Image (cartoon, rainbow, N blue to C red):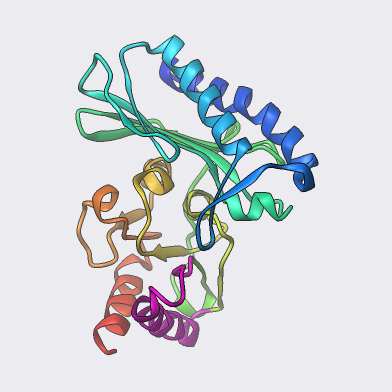
């Protein structure tokens, strides 16, 4: 049976508490107050409410910790070495369109190292979680990345660049990467939630995932999950500074090197 630390219990309890109102709002999606932050980049009243509940609940249990959240950015705590990295709703566009694929993501970073992550998908009550050295789990079931070793048998997930006019060059490069992966794999999926894409890599539901131009809160919890499930994860270019660059590529141990070379090669050959 899975053994959770005190910090993990706090993180999971916060996600569960915040999800109650989120599920009610999802059931009334047509009535949500939605403001537009930018093209294809929305914030809802539900986002703000979940962020508030998470911060309040986590602060009560760990009063000295800081925060980095999508809604409010960085808040320093009395403990300079510890902070929670939060995305209150990863998959907001799915959420406001009534598409049942979104999650709450919470990571714990201490002394610059990610040590715990929770990705909670409330509609299916799927709690993906991991702690450094303690493995990755889905509820009470241990997770391992897929064992597939041939690209032709593998499914990969990705995300598309936004803002067609402004990001035209990025989209051109991305399409080269997609074409390269499509040519040698069993297919590509675009689900609309980076956190769940990484959780699915950890769970072996997809063999790999890559994306550019993400934020730390999109990927922090998923980084812990992939590593603890036996997978490999880096920037697309091979570096290790994923939270800063927003570039991520993840896969199992058998496909990681070849997958990375394929995507990087497609980018270089444009």
Above or below: residue 121 compared with residue 10: below
Image position of 170 (left or right of 178): left
Q: Specify the quadrant of the image occupied by residue 191.
A: bottom right
**Horizontal and vertical percent position of residue 23:** 72, 35
Q: Specify the quadrant of the image occupied by residue 228.
A: top left
Q: Looking at the image, can residue 132 be seen?
A: no
Q: Does the magenta stretch include residue 176?
A: yes
**Horizontal and vertical percent position of residue 9:** 50, 19
Task: Name the residue: 53% across, 75% down.
Answer: 153
Task: Name the residue: 35% across, 61% down.
Answer: 213
**Horizontal and vertical percent position of residue 70:** 43, 40
Foreground pick, 110 / 165? 165
Image position of 30 (left or right of 114): right
Above or below: residue 139 compared with residue 4: below
Pick the quarter of the image with the N terminus. Answer: top right
Above or below: residue 100 compared with residue 2: below
Q: Looking at the image, can residue 180 be seen?
A: yes
Image position of 144 (left or right of 81): right
Task: Name the residue: 28% across, 48% down.
Answer: 243
Q: Does the magenta stretch include residue 155?
A: no
Pick the quarter of the image with the C terminus. Answer: bottom left
**Horizontal and vertical percent position of residue 8:** 45, 23
| Magenta span of residues | 159-185
Above or below: residue 193 compared with residue 110: below
Q: Specify the quadrant of the image occupied by residue 188.
A: bottom right
The secondary structure that dominates the magenta segment is helix
């Amino acid at each position: 049976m899975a053994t959770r630390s005190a910090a993990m219990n706090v993180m999971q309890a916060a996600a569960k508490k915040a999800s109650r109102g989120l599920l009610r709002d999802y059931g009334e999606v047509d009535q949500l107050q939605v403001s537009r932050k930018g093209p294809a980049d929305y914030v809802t009243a539900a986002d703000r409410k979940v962020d508030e509940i998470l911060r309040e609940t986590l602060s009560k249990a760990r009063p000295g910790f800081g925060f980095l959240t999508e809604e409010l950015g960085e808040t320093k705590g009395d403990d300079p070495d510890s902070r929670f990295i939060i995305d209150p709703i990863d998959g907001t566009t799915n959420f406001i369109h009534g598409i049942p694929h979104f999650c709450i993501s919470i990571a714990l970073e201490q002394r610059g190292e990610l040590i715990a992550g929770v990705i909670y998908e409330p509609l299916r009550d799927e709690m993906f979680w991991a702690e450094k050295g303690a493995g990755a789990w889905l509820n009470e079931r241990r997770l391992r990345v897929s064992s597939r070793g041939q690209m032709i048998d593998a499914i990969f997930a990705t995300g598309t660049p936004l803002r067609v006019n402004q990001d035209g060059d990025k989209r051109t490069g991305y399409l080269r990467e997609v074409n390269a992966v499509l040519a040698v794999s069993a297919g590509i999926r675009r689900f609309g939630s980076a956190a769940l894409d990484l959780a699915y890599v950890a769970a072996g539901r997809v063999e790999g995932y890559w994306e550019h131009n993400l934020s730390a809160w999109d990927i922090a919890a998923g980084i812990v999950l992939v590593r603890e499930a036996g997978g490999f994860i880096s920037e697309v270019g091979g570096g290790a500074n994923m939270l800063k660059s927003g570039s991520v590529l993840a896969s199992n141990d058998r496909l990681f090197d070849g997958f990375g070379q394929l995507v990087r090669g497609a980018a270089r050959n444009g």
